[in-house]
Image: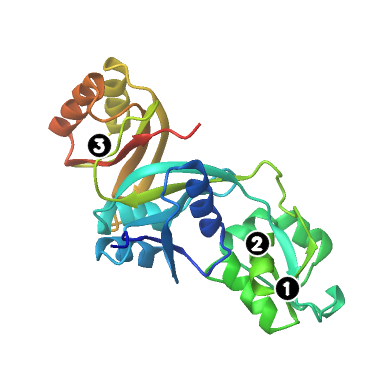
Amino acid sequence: MSQHKLTYAFLGPAGTFSDMAVRALVERGSLSADYESLPCDSLPEVFEAVERGKADYGVVPIENSLEGSVTAVLDAFAFTSRAEILGEIAIDIHQALLLNPDATLDEVTTIASHTQGIGQCRRWINQNLPNRQLRLADSTAAAAEMAAADKSVAAIASPLAAEICGINVYEEAIEDNLSSQTRFVIIGKGPVAHDGPGKSTLALFMNTDRPGTLQMILSELFFAGVNLTMVQSRPTKQELGDYMFFMDIDGYADEPNIQVALNCLRMKMREVKVIGSYPRSV
């Protein structure tokens, strides 16, 4: 009897940085090497594939070291999805300028990429291809497909996308900051083994907006001896000026001191949601 292959959903098509993150997680042993890919057209579709059982796991970007958090992913965790974070990995992001094999740089009138790709290469674009039209694509690999179909379009994407689409790498490493990294997370359901130092991601919702709320949260973490590594506010999408907080803390949610902090916060806030408690990437 053949063993069931796992299915991994990610922002497609093949050759995106999300695809690269899946491959890196497989290589590291965090995901099984016996799998089928499920490229999705958007990040919400990745969450939906996991929720509906079309995929066993999803891999989504959550934060870039230059462009900040991926708000569509944060909002999905906070408001629409029951998926949990099961693991994470940070990968180096190296963007390349890709051209149709029949194109020269002078023929390029449009530069296509995902909004993060364009944001990471603004200086290079302004210095080397000023006054070109910028076209947003659903992913960097989708931009590579545009370049493959139209020689007036250059794509900002990975060399892997060029290889898959059969187009040329004109110049590598065009990102403004060569230390750019993106953190990806595995989403799904189920228990997570305590494999090394832990990390937990929280979503905290206030009862009412009042002075000192953030100070109160930080005080509870401090008194419990919990180390805060990230905090960010996001609108709740209910009314103007109504915000909630995302936080990353060191440690697993079932550790005694973190349990103390969470229980104290739950008595003072409308909701404290543990989005995931998982091994910290090193």
Q: Nearer the viewer, residue 88 or 7?
A: 7
Residue 142 position by quadrant: bottom right
Residue 200 position by quadrant: top left
User: Label 1 belongs to which residue?
Assistant: 167
Q: Is residue 255 left or right of residue 28?
A: left
Q: Label 2 to label 1, Cα distance in Å?
A: 10 Å
Instruction: Classify 10 Å Cα crowding around label 3: few (below 14), some (14-19), many (20 and above).
Output: few
User: Label 3 belongs to which residue?
Assistant: 210
Q: Nearer the viewer, mark 3 or mark 2?
A: 2
Sequence-wise first label, 3 or 2: 2
**Amino acid type shown at disc 1:** Ile
Q: Is residue 96 visible?
A: yes
Image location (x, y in percent) of residue 179: 67, 41
Relative to 45, does residue 177 appear above or below in the rendering?
Answer: above
**Amino acid type shown at disc 3:** Arg
* Residue at the farthest left position: 267
Image location (x, y in percent) of residue 3: 32, 59
User: Label 2 belongs to which residue?
Assistant: 160
Q: Label 3 to label 2, Cα distance in Å?
A: 49 Å
Which residue sits at x=80%, y=67%? 129
Q: Number of numbered discs present?
A: 3
Image location (x, y in percent) of residue 118: 64, 61
Sequence-wise first label, 2 or 1: 2
